[in-house]
Amino acid sequence: MVPLSQTSTDEDDYINEIVGLKTQFDIFRFLKRVTEAYRSRAFMVLNLPPITSLDLQGSTVITSWPAELLALYDQEALMVNSPVLRRLRTSTRPFFYDMSRETWSRDDGKSALVTGLFERFRMIRGAYFPTHEASGLRGAVSFAGDREPFSAAEMRELCYIAIHVFDRLAEIRNLDTRMTDSLTDREIDCLNWTAAGKTSAEIAEILALSEHTVNHYLNRATKKLDTVNRTQAVAKALRIGLIK
């Protein structure tokens, strides 16, 4: 993948690729490619947190930020008084930021701490693209690194990508919710025990069912989750929080 400004690829091809993404992990891999193509280091998709929220990780949908950076950010409560989040709450226009510039200083005395932290991970500059889904939920997609500011063309392209990615994530979440609602308690029980390493015969004994009935429940759960076998069904059920 290369930036749109460097290729003749039609924008419809980009839409078709995003529409074809089936899972959050597909979108993660897609955004990793976009991040590299635009010479950035990390991306983040987040739901706009309430003003009282102190936890950035809780508002993050998917991200390639280093885990240590996220942990330190929340440990220092840096979301409070964040000029980036303040801008996202008051404007729907995309913007480029540079944490080393005075215009992005904080009013809580933590400017040097934030700058040093993001310099350590080479993510001092980047851009945010405000987004929203059909339900009205607001969010944003960001790309961060230490490159020079994005060009006007790159900002337009990344804004285009961000809008469609956020919409597709919402569609995937809605599909996952419908799948969760459609599974019966017995199907979920069978998935849980399969995830615990039990065979159909062992599950049948635990649940006082026949082995044939257990296989029936697992096959039905596999179809409802749009997977090809019970291993994939368990993996998807774990990913969407259906089982733990």
Image (cartoon, grey):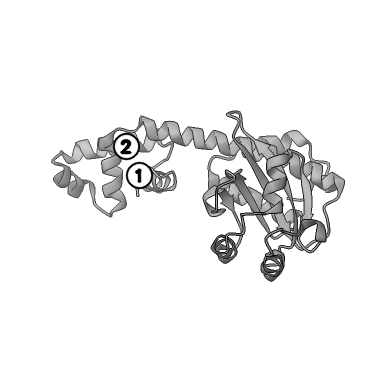
Asked whether the beta carbons under mark 1 and mark 2 sit within 8 Å of each other, the answer is: yes
Neighbourhood count class around disc 2 (C-alpha, 10 Å): few under 14, some 14–19, many 20 upward: some
Q: Residue at x 82, y 52 (%)?
A: 150
In the picture of the structure, the residue carrying the numbered disc 1 is 230
- Depth check, front residue: 206 or 72: 72
Residue 17 placement (x, y as % from top left): 66, 39
Residue furthest to the right in view is 152
Left or right of 2 in this view: 78: left
Residue 159 placement (x, y as % from top left): 75, 41
Name the amino acid type tagged 2: Asn
Left or right of 178 in this view: 48: right
Q: Residue at x 86, y 50 (%)?
A: 151
Q: CA distance from mark 1 to mark 2?
A: 7 Å
Question: Which of the 4 quarters of the picture holds residue 103?
Answer: bottom right
Whether 171 is drawn above or below 148: the answer is: above
- Depth check, front residue: 225 or 56: 56
Dot 1: element? helix
Whether 45 is drawn above or below 132: the answer is: below
Residue 14 placement (x, y as % from top left): 71, 39
Whether 81 is drawn above or below 93: the answer is: below
Left or right of 53 in this view: 157: right
In the picture of the structure, the residue carrying the numbered disc 2 is 219
Mark number displayed over residue 76: none
Neighbourhood count class around disc 1 (C-alpha, 10 Å): few under 14, some 14–19, many 20 upward: many
Q: Earlier in the sequence, mark 1 or mark 2?
A: 2
Name the amino acid type tagged 1: Arg
Dot 2: element? helix
